[in-house]
Image (cartoon, grey):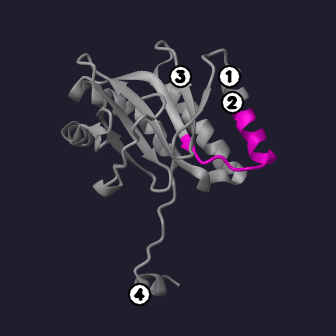
Amino acid sequence: MSFFRALLGRSKPARPDLDALFALPSAAVTLEAAAGFTPTGTGSVAFRAAEGKAFADLEREVTALLDADGGPPVETTADDYGYTWLVLRSSTESGISDLVTDVHAVNSSLEHAGFGPSLLCSLTAFGDAKGRSVALVYLYKRGTFYPFAPLGGQRRDNALELQVAAAIGGDLPMEQDKSRWFPVYGAPGL
């Protein structure tokens, strides 16, 4: 079958590696040392909500699970493109590790329930003393990360994105195809 895929120019999609999310804390240390960006304590997961009771029950269970630890409540918002975002926040004391664990829990819960194809991306927000923000975006279907640095409106800071990618490229599996560095303008939590 792989011969026909090659002949027709099709490639097998990369399998998502949700455990790559656990490399974010070390990438955060590198990002702070290299560019002065620290985690804001906010992350989010974007997915296309499915119709039906099974998905609604799963979404309610995931939200209840994350709210149960006494932390800030999980916010659910919808964007202009029809994606649902679960916005997660962690306290500054618990740091990025707890946030990454929560983001991983949401992704793996949706995947194990059969809704993996509905997952779009996850992002973790960072900020610096100059007021700039950058997100490390995990593309679920590609199993890779890329930086996104919004400037306001529909503009982005490409130079900062390249600087961040160069700084953390050894810590995270980076998306090499820059045409897949999709802007997530107005993403909740960024």
Q: Secondary structure at mark 2?
A: helix
Asked if the stretch drawn in magenta spans residue 91, the answer is no
- Which amino acid lies under the numbered mark 3 shown in the image of this protein? Arg
User: At which x and y percent is residue 83?
Assistant: 56, 44
Asked whether the beta carbons under mark 1 and mark 3 sit within 8 Å of each other, the answer is no
In the rendering, at what x and y percent does residue 128 appear?
Answer: 28, 21
Q: Give above or below for 20 relative to 16.
A: above
Question: SS of the residue at dot 3?
Answer: strand
State how far apart marks 4 and 2 are (Cα).
45 Å
Where does residue 22 sit, x and y in percent of width and height?
48, 37
Label of residue 45 in the image: none
Q: Residue at x 61, y 16 (%)?
A: 71
Left or right of 21? Residue 179 is left
Q: Which dot marks residue 63?
A: 2
Q: Secondary structure at mark 1?
A: helix
Mark pair 1, 3: CA separation: 10 Å
Over which residues does the magenta segment extend? 46-62
Callout 1: few (<14), some (14-19), or many (20+) C-alpha neighbours within 10 Å?
some
Residue 21, percent from left and from top: 47, 40
The number of callouts visible is 4
Label pair 4/2, CB-CB below 8 angstroms: no
Q: CA distance from mark 3 to mark 4?
A: 47 Å
- The residue to which callout 1 is attached is 67
Determine which residue is flagged by label 3.
89
Image marks 1 and 2: residues in contact by CB distance under 8 Å: yes
Looking at the rendered structure, the kind of residue marked 2 is Thr
Choose the circle earlier in sequence order: 4 or 1: 4
Residue on which the image places disc 4 = 7
| Disc on the earlier residue, 3 or 4 | 4
